[in-house]
Amino acid sequence: MARKSKRQRLEEQRERQATVRADAKANKKPGRDDFARVLLWQAIVKAQRQQDGGRKLDQLRDKMTDVLEKQGFNLKEAEDVFHELARKYATGLYPFRPKFYMGHPPK
């Protein structure tokens, strides 16, 4: 049996991936990024609400930005993004856009 060409393997992979994405969308299956966004939002809001919120928020920032720096990201830029998110989440409003393609906005 001859090995499939690279083009054929890539086309089959594209088809498989399209099916996986379509199934996930049809089943409203959250992905890793969806969980990561919610987890980060909850961690920031919890740190802000604690009595020692400023210190807890700084500790969370330091832990996260240290890992990002080790991955090759610019530390100052990572800190800026964290502070921007913390300011955004401090309003207390639900920060995520509704995903209307799922049939309804979040409650």
Image (cartoon, rainbow, N blue to C red):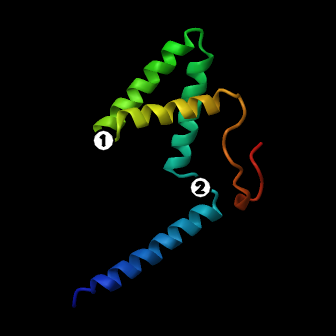
Type of amino acid at the residue the image marks with label 2: Lys
Quarter the N terminus occupies: bottom left
At numbered mark 2, what does the secondary structure look like: helix, strand or loop?
Answer: loop
- Residue 78 is situated, as x and y percent measured from the top left of the image, at 42, 36
Q: Say which of marks 1 and 2 sits in front.
A: 1
Q: Amino acid at mark 1?
A: Gln
Q: Which residue extends farthest top?
A: 51
Residue 98 vertical position relative to residue 10 in the rendered view, above or below: above
Judge whether 27 appears above or below 106 on screen: below
Q: Earlier in the sequence, mark 1 or mark 2?
A: 2
Do the residues bearing badges 1 and 2 touch, measured as CB atoms within 8 Å?
Answer: no
Name which quarter of the figure residue 2 lies in: bottom left
Q: Position of residue 43 (x, y in %)?
A: 54, 27
Residue lying at 71% horizontally and 37% vertically, measured from the top left:
94
Task: Say which residue label 1 marks.
Answer: 71
| 73 and 71: which is toward the camera | 73
Q: Is residue 44 above or below residue 24?
A: above
| Residue 18 located left or right of residue 69 | right
Q: How busy is the neighbourhood of tag 2: few (under 14 within 10 Å), some, or many (20 plus)?
A: few
Residue 29 x %, y %: 59, 55
> Judging from the image, what secondary structure is the residue with disc 1 in?
loop
Q: Quadrant of the C terminus?
A: top right
Q: Identify the image quadrant of residue 39.
A: top right
Q: Nearer the viewer, residue 5 or 76?
A: 76
- In the drawing, does residue 93 fall left or right of residue 86? right
